[in-house]
Amino acid sequence: MNADQIPPKATARFYRIKYMSRFLKGLIFAYFGVISLLVIYGRIMSSLGVDVLPPSSETLGESVYQTIYYALSLLAVITLYRLLNFYERGMIFSGANTTQIRHLGILAMAYGLLKACNSLFLPNEGIFMVLTALINFLMSPWFFAGCFIIIITWIMDEGRKIQEEQELTV
């Protein structure tokens, strides 16, 4: 068999990977499509004078917190979508793939930091709010999951580099 050809077993596996990648991308699209429709519905109803939601009494800090939260969520979805595109193209162990996984780890750590800083956006609680934010950050599962993802990605990247070096020496 030619070394450049993909064996039939591997081809079937690539098709399964492509199918699952497309399925997950469809789920992401459907989820955010429904959320967007609900937001649009709420805006239309409020412009007509019908209150769908109770009036909000958010402070500026809470609004900033929500904006950062939505921005991080959007970045995570974009990164996940890019990663699934690489899987769909058959790029499973590539440098671009590990970069996207690393970005997901960084976003998880940023989300952990944001969740920990939630107490800073609440009304003034005195000197303990900084201490509470620090303890929440150090105890955040998002922070540790992000660190774990980054370390695993580094191991994957080093393994990929070793494999590429071995392919060049043959």
Image (tube, rainbow, N blue to C red):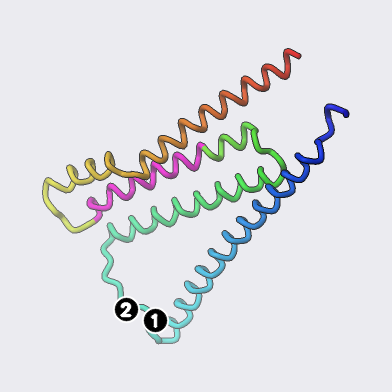
Count of number-bearing discs = 2
Q: Position of residue 122 (x, y in %)?
A: 22, 57
Residue in front for this viewpoint, 40 or 1: 1
Residue for point 56% across, 29% down: 156
Q: Which residue is mark 1?
A: 52
Residue 116, labelled with which disc? none
Magenta residues, start to end: 102-121
What SS does tag 2 mark? loop
Q: Is residue 65 magenta?
A: no
Q: Position of residue 140 (x, y in %)?
A: 31, 44
Residue for point 46% across, 34% down: 150
Residue in front for this viewpoint, 143 or 55: 143
Q: Marks 1/2: CA distance? A: 7 Å
Q: Which residue is mark 2?
A: 54
Q: Is residue 117 magenta?
A: yes
Q: Which residue sits furthest right?
A: 1
Residue for point 61% across, 37% down: 97
From the viewer's perspective, is 5 left or right of 98? Answer: right
User: For the residue marked with disc 2, what is the amino acid?
Assistant: Pro
What SS does tag 1 mark? loop
